Image (cartoon, rainbow, N blue to C red):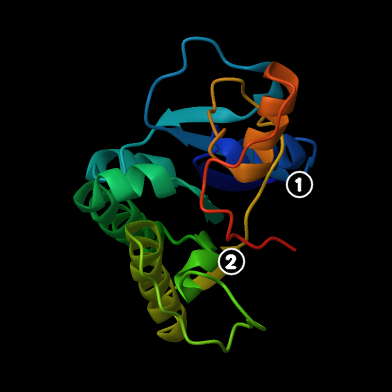
Amino acid sequence: MSAKVLITGGSGYLGGRLVQALAEEPRFHLRLGARQPLTLKPAWLGEAEIVPLDLLSQEDLHSACRGVRYVIHLAALNEVESLANPEEALLINGLGSLKLLEAAKRAGVERFIYFSTAHVYGSPLAGLITEASLPRPNHPYAITHKVAEDFVLAAHDKKTIQGLVLRLSNGFGAPASAKVKRWTLIVNDLCRQAVTTGKLALTSSGLQWRD
């Protein structure tokens, strides 16, 4: 019998590609939480089940977690949205993640996988950074992700659920859905400029490092 997996943010930039990969695995039955109803289910979602999910709605959280074995939590405001509205970022990225975690525990979910960010180590990232490096978040995006991390790891330490935190570096490339707009990422931005203008111009400080 396939394991039921709830994925939040499954139609987003990273989540869409993750869903595409997992949809090909017969071991999993995917359930996608969607904040906005999909008028037309994209082909890349495969046989995935789509359920309404407002991270601040207890009813939605209860229904979404019912019968689920694993939760993969990617839904969050991005760095641009978080900077523009830090309070909403704290509400969604922080409190919303906590509410989902608590709902998962009540539903008997086995493992909760949280997708965080390397930005929790601060900016600019310099030198050798490992999991033992001291986090110094200094941006609303990083701060709110660190809040969610702490709740997940605390639950893991208390053995109320298996919690796992992944601190991702920068991604790049085409999203699964054309509706996802991530042109602020430097690699994507330069590719678009090359195609549309035939020129490459930095629109940021130029001090960023990528490996």
Q: Which residue is mark 2?
A: 166
Q: Amino acid at mark 2?
A: Leu
The picture places residue 128, in percent across and down from the top left corner, at 67, 83
Dot 2: what SS? strand
Quarter occupied by residue 170: bottom right
Q: Residue at x 68, y 42 (%)?
A: 187
Task: Count how many numbered circles sit on residues in the image.
Answer: 2
The answer, for residue 107, to whether it is visible in the render is yes
Q: Which mark is residue 27?
A: 1
SS category of the residue bearing label 1: loop
Q: How many residues crowd mark 2 within 10 Å: few (<14), some (14–19), many (20+)? A: few
Nearest to the observer: residue 209 or residue 93: 209
**Residue type, label 1:** Arg
- Give whichever of 44, 85 is nearer the camera: 85
Tell me if residue 44 comes above or below residue 211 in the rendering: above
Indicate left or right for 86 with 29 as reference.
left
In the image, residue 129 sits, relative to residue 170, either above or below, namely below
Residue 76 is at least partly visible in this image: no
